[in-house]
Amino acid sequence: MKGLSPPPNGGGAVTPGGLRILVVESHALVGAALSVLLCGPPLAAAVEIVLDGLTAMARLEASDFNLVVCELSIPPRSAAFVISKLSALGCAIPVMLLSDAEEQHLLLDAVTSGAAGFFTKDCHPDEFLDGVSTVLDGHYAVGRKLMPGMLARLAGAKKAASSR
């Protein structure tokens, strides 16, 4: 959240006003694939990859980012830790959550976490990039595979609220 500095991993060029994305992903291969995707067109973002939530918080406190793409179950703390810390700092950086397809129920549970985007790691790259653009435009984004479960939860919450 301070001045711009080049990513230590040699990520994309950093220019003032350029799009900067922090990827928090415990699997180096997945993080590298996300970096390639986000550095390319249409976003051409400068991407920094960190492997855990504690390092993510240190980087967020030291540098400016436009978006955080965060694995849901990052060690040693969950993505909810990162989101709550950002909120406590009064930081309005949007967070997108990613999980394995087998954990999509956990993504649905995270709907009230304050995250702006929800995707499984098996989504199509174009769908993910559309979601990133949507979140950067100030909206929420939900992956197609999550949509039925998301709608069911919202319908259930609305039904429960109306029966009170």
Image: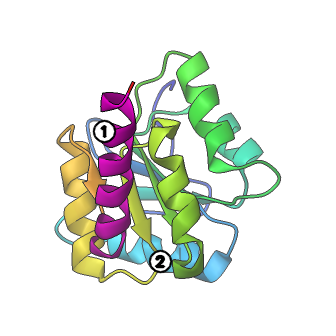
Residue 106 x, y percent position in the rendering: 58, 61
Whether residue 45 appears in this view of the structure is: no
Instruction: Find residue 114 and name its label.
Output: none
Who's the residue at 47% across and 22% down the image?
Answer: 91
Left or right of 119? Residue 27 is right
Instruction: Find residue 121 and name its label.
Output: 2
Of 82 and 151, nearer the camera is 151
Residue 86 x, y percent position in the rendering: 56, 28
Of 15 and 147, nearer the camera is 147
Gap in angstroms between the C-alphas marked 1 and 2? 29 Å
Range of magenta residues: 144-163
Q: Is residue 146 magenta?
A: yes
Pointer 1 local density, CA inside 10 Å: few below 14, some 14–19, many at least 20? few
Residue on which disc 1 sits:
158
Residue 141 position by quadrant: bottom left
Q: Is residue 149 magenta?
A: yes
Mark 1 vs mark 2: which is more N-terminal? 2
The amino acid pointed to by label 1 is Lys
Q: Is residue 135 above or below residue 61?
A: below
Who's the residue at 30% across and 80% down the image?
Answer: 125
Residue 78 x, y percent position in the rendering: 70, 50
Closer mark to the observer between disc 1 and disc 2: 1
The amino acid pointed to by label 2 is Lys
